[in-house]
Structure formats: C-alpha cells, structure tokens
Image: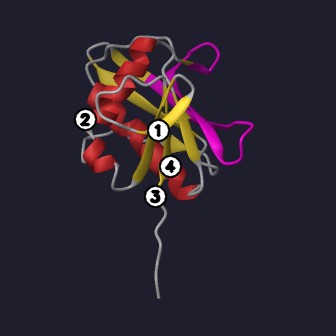
Amino acid sequence: MNLDRYELTSGNKLTAFEFVSRGPKGLIPKLVQFTPTNYKDLYNLAFGDKDADTGQINDIAISNNGDSEQVLATVVAAVIAFTDRYPNASIYATGSSKSRTRLYRMGITKYFQEAKSNFLIYGQIHSEWEPFVIGENYDAFIVQRKLLKFEI
C-alpha cells in the first residue's frame, strides 16, 4: 500500500501508536492500540479518536475529516510496525458497529492483492474462520504477518 500516511509516534513496546488526522474538521488526534487477549500471540486492534478528557480511544466517534485513505494507510503502517516487532502476533479486528466492520472489509478488499503478499488474512462468519474472500460479509478479521522461510 503505497499511500500517503500520517507520522506515527509510539513507545518502545510498539503496542500503542498516536497520529493526528488533518482535514476540513481540523486536527483530530487518533490512537491505535494492540492489546493481548487470552489466546497466545493474539492481539486485539483498537482504533479511534483520542478522547481529549480521558486520553483513551473513542471508537464510536465519526470524524469525517476527508482523509479516510490516509487514516487507513496509517493504521496499516501501525500493523506493519507492530508485526515487525512481534512477528508471531495475530491481530484481531472488528468494527464498533456493523457499518465500521463493513468499512474495514472494504479497505481490506481494496488493497487485498497487495496485502496478501505480506499477510495472511482471515474473515469470521458466524463464529467460523476462513481465508478472506472478496465479497463476503465478515463479522471480524484476523491478520498474520507471513514469516519468511529460508531453505539452504
């Protein structure tokens, strides 16, 4: 994905990232966080606006700042940085609403050909996981970085 993206900042662990969306609605701070789950090497991806009062993610805010492609590219850059650091990690993602999950599916679909060269992508339908198929309506997604295998 060779799109413009925002500059990310993160701590040493690379489990939380911040950036600022710039558009007609002004400067909107955003957060991307990777939180461990109860399953080994499975992390939940949380993303949204940074709440000015709490400093936490507000994943139901609708910014409509006219930069969705750049925001998507920035979240993908965070996923790449996180999986560079934690190559065995699997990342679980779903939207805070059906419409948000649909937006994630549309983003994956749009860049699927490029993404599949570096990631394994799975979709969940009715509690069952399958390799991502364009056109399916998934409830959630899991992405895993493809590991390089060398033969000598």
- Quickly name the residue at label 3: 146
Q: Which residues are magenta?
A: 29-57
* Real-space CA distance between mark 3 and mark 4, rounded to the nearest whole angstrom: 6 Å
Q: Residue lying farthest bottom? A: 152
Q: Which residue: 56% across, 15% down?
A: 52
Residue 141 located left or right of residue 12: left
User: Badge 1, how many Cα within 10 Å: few under 14, some, many 20+?
Assistant: few
Residue 116 located left or right of residue 52: left
**Three-letter code for the amino acid on which mark 4 is drawn:** Gln
Q: Earlier in the sequence, mark 1 or mark 4?
A: 1
Residue 65 image offset from top left, x and y in percent: 31, 17
Q: Which residue: 37% across, 20% down?
A: 102
Q: Which residue: 25% across, 35% down?
A: 110
Q: Earlier in the sequence, mark 1 or mark 2?
A: 2
- Quickly name the residue at label 4: 144
Residue 12 image offset from top left, x and y in percent: 63, 51
* Real-space CA distance between mark 2 and mark 3, rounded to the nearest whole angstrom: 19 Å
Callouts 2 and 4 close, C-beta under 8 Å: no
Residue 42 image offset from top left, x and y in percent: 64, 42
* Real-space CA distance between mark 1 and mark 3, rounded to the nearest whole angstrom: 16 Å
Callouts 3 and 4 close, C-beta under 8 Å: yes
What predominant SS class does the magenta segment belong to?
strand
